[in-house]
Image: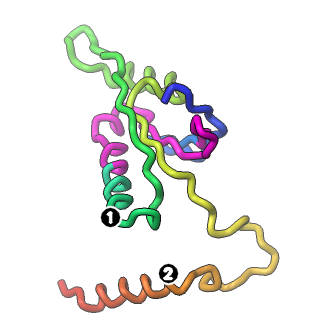
Amino acid sequence: IAELEVIRVLGEGQRKIAFEVKLPWGEQAVVKRCKNYTCTKSNKKRKEAKILKELQEQYGDEAAHYFGECDAPTLPMDNEDGNLDSAAFTNHVKKNLSNFSVGYTAVIELGKPLLPSWKMRDRKCFAEFLTERDIEDIRNIARRYANFSK
């Protein structure tokens, strides 16, 4: 995982960050990481990775490909009381965001955008981008909600 080449930052929020990376065999993927103590403590990335892994196991090639994860140790950041110093931990994680040998990292397939650009001149109906299978899936979801009662 240390050999992943970072191409660019795809997105960054308050707690998480996503990188576009080049895998050793040339394929591009997404690497997702927590960037503060709160995200790390709540195991948000592990939970998301578990869901993606289960989706791939259940649906195979129809789901986003889950390449794997690496849970490399982070340095303990204890303060004088022996408790974890969350500010020092967050600072350490932010310094090592693109060092995938530190902390938890999930590697997922880079999806293809549905629309090439949001700045299209001739706007089409969104439904034109859906396949027959997509429409059938929407119908099945609607049927499930129609039978759902409180």
Amino acid at circle 1: Gln
Disc 2 secondary structure class: helix
Tell me what residue is drawn at x 44 percent, y 26 percent: 93
Query: Would residue 111 be seen by someone viewing this image from the given angle?
Result: yes
Residue 112 place in picture, x, y as percent: 61, 61
Q: Is residue 72 above or below residue 52?
A: above
Question: At 29% from the left edge and 91% from the top edge, which residue is drawn?
Answer: 146
Q: Residue at x 42, y 24 (%)?
A: 102
- Amino acid found under the numbered disc labelled 2: Asp
Q: Is residue 111 above or below residue 78?
A: below
- Residue 58 disc label: 1
Q: Nearer the viewer, residue 15 or 144?
A: 144
Q: Of 98 and 91, which appears nearest the observer?
A: 98
Choose the circle earlier in sequence order: 1 or 2: 1
Crowding near the residue tagged with mark 2, few <14, some 14–19, many ≥20 C-alpha atoms within 10 Å: few
Q: Nearer the viewer, residue 121 or 137?
A: 137
Q: CA distance from mark 1 to mark 2?
A: 18 Å
Tell me if 132 is positioned left or right of 5 in this view.
Answer: left
Check disc 1: other Cα within 10 Å, few if <14, some if 14-19, many if 20+. few
Let me know if residue 71 is in the magenta part.
Answer: no
In percent of width and height, residue 111 lies at 57, 58
> What numbered label is drawn on residue 134?
2
Please state the horizontal and vertical placement of residue 121, each as a whole percent of the image: 81, 75
Res 14 visible:
no
- The image quadrant that residue 77 belongs to is top left
Part of the protein shown in magenta: 20-49
